[in-house]
């Protein structure tokens, strides 16, 4: 009896604090049938950004005639694209894939070789200083994926070579097709991989992943996962990613202290009350309308 009364009181309290009306979201089946729409606020030479599902963006490496090789424009546009996505309150999850026959052939050696050979500087020390600055700029092109608080899912088909491994190592989740293959290629062109593979790959080997029969099935699986994530509280999802990233690079005690400081404010979110209400009513989080973040 006491438990029933307590449950009734809690339900009443939650209802009074629930500020938004619950409206059902579109089903995955209905969303799957709708074609992807180009995203008006994103216009790039090397990337194609579209709306794959509600609150889910699809970022496609879009140089299929060049096997999605990464030229100078690509490195700049990745930063522009994901900085914009970070600030986009309508987006809650991202899928990254490659157009054409493969994910990416890696760095466009035909265009990029001169970037690192023709370095300005009056002597070796000054050239080295300027080269380090340039490397740090290129590292940012993939660090921006890791820093983005929205979960980023890599969907890989065919070859993922060189810089492609750097890219997917900076993502949060990796899906691939049965024909996907991976190669850390930099050593074959005379250098150590320097934009993230050597730092991130050892940390993600062994993570759970999925393999699909073909590209279409893989993209559908990635979009459904992203839509499922996007249907949850953005406060909870983005807070989870940020604290996972922090804890990965710090001790357990430091991570716990950071988590306590983070949640001293985040636990006051209305999302918590809405989610608790849905749980009491045995409803899915997809039926909750969460405020933008």
Image: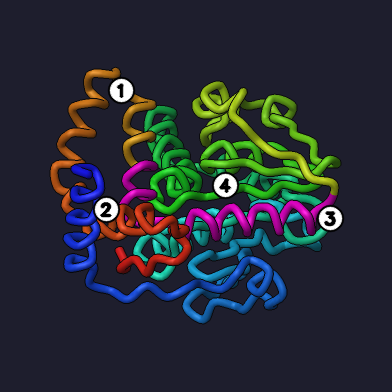
Seen as rendered, the residue at the extreme front is: 1
Range covered by the magenta-colored residues: 214-241
Is 223 in the magenta?
A: yes
- Mark 2 or 4: in front is 2
In three-dimensional space, the C-alpha distance between marks 3 and 2, rounded to whole angstroms, equals 44 Å
> If the image is split into quadrants, where does the N terminus sit?
top left
Q: Which mark is residue 279?
A: none
Query: Can you tell which quarter of the image residue 220 is in?
Result: bottom right
Q: Are marks 3 and 1 in contact (CB under 8 Å)?
A: no
- Please provide percent x and percent y for residue 283: 44, 59
Is 68 in the magenta?
A: no
Which residue in the structure is indicated by mark 2?
272
Is residue 200 visible to us here?
yes
- Mark 2 or 1: in front is 2
Label 4: which secondary element: helix
Is residue 71 visible to us here?
no
- Give the residue at x 74% y 61%: 99
- Give the residue at x 65% y 44%: 113
Which residue in the structure is indicated by mark 1?
250
- Give the residue at x 34% y 66%: 290
Q: Reading the chain from its start, which is encountered first: label 3 or label 4? A: 3
Q: Are marks 2 and 4 in contact (CB under 8 Å)?
A: no
In three-dimensional space, the C-alpha distance between marks 2 and 4, rounded to whole angstroms, equals 50 Å
């Amino acid at each position: 009896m006491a438990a029933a009364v307590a449950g009734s009181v809690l339900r009443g309290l939650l209802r009074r604090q629930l500020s938004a009306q619950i409206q059902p979201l579109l089903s995955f089946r209905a969303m799957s049938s709708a074609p992807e729409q180009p995203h008006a606020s994103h216009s790039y030479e090397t990337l194609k950004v579209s709306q794959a599902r509600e609150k889910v963006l699809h970022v496609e490496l879009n140089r299929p005639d060049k096997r999605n090789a990464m030229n100078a424009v690509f490195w700049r546009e990745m930063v522009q694209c994901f900085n914009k996505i970070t600030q986009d309150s309508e987006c809650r999850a991202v899928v990254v894939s490659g157009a054409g026959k493969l994910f990416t052939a890696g760095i466009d050696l035909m265009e990029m070789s001169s970037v690192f050979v023709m370095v300005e500087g009056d002597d070796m020390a000054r050239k080295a200083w300027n080269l380090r600055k340039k490397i740090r700029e290129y590292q940012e092109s993939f660090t921006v994926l890791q820093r983005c608080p929205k979960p980023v899912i890599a969907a890989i088909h065919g070859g993922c070579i060189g810089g492609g491994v750097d890219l997917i190592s900076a993502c949060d989740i990796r899906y691939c097709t049965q024909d996907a293959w991976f190669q850390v290629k930099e050593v074959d062109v005379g250098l150590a991989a320097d934009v993230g593979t050597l730092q991130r790959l050892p940390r993600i080997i062994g993570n759970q992943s999925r393999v699909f029969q073909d590209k279409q099935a893989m993209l559908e699986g990635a979009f459904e996962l992203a839509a499922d994530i996007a249907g949850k509280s953005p406060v909870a999802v983005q807070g989870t990613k940020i604290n996972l990233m922090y804890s990965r690079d710090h001790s357990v005690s430091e991570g716990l202290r950071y988590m306590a400081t983070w949640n001293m404010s985040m636990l006051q979110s209305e999302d918590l009350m809405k989610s608790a209400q849905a749980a009491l009513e045995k409803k899915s989080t997809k039926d909750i309308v969460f405020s933008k973040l």
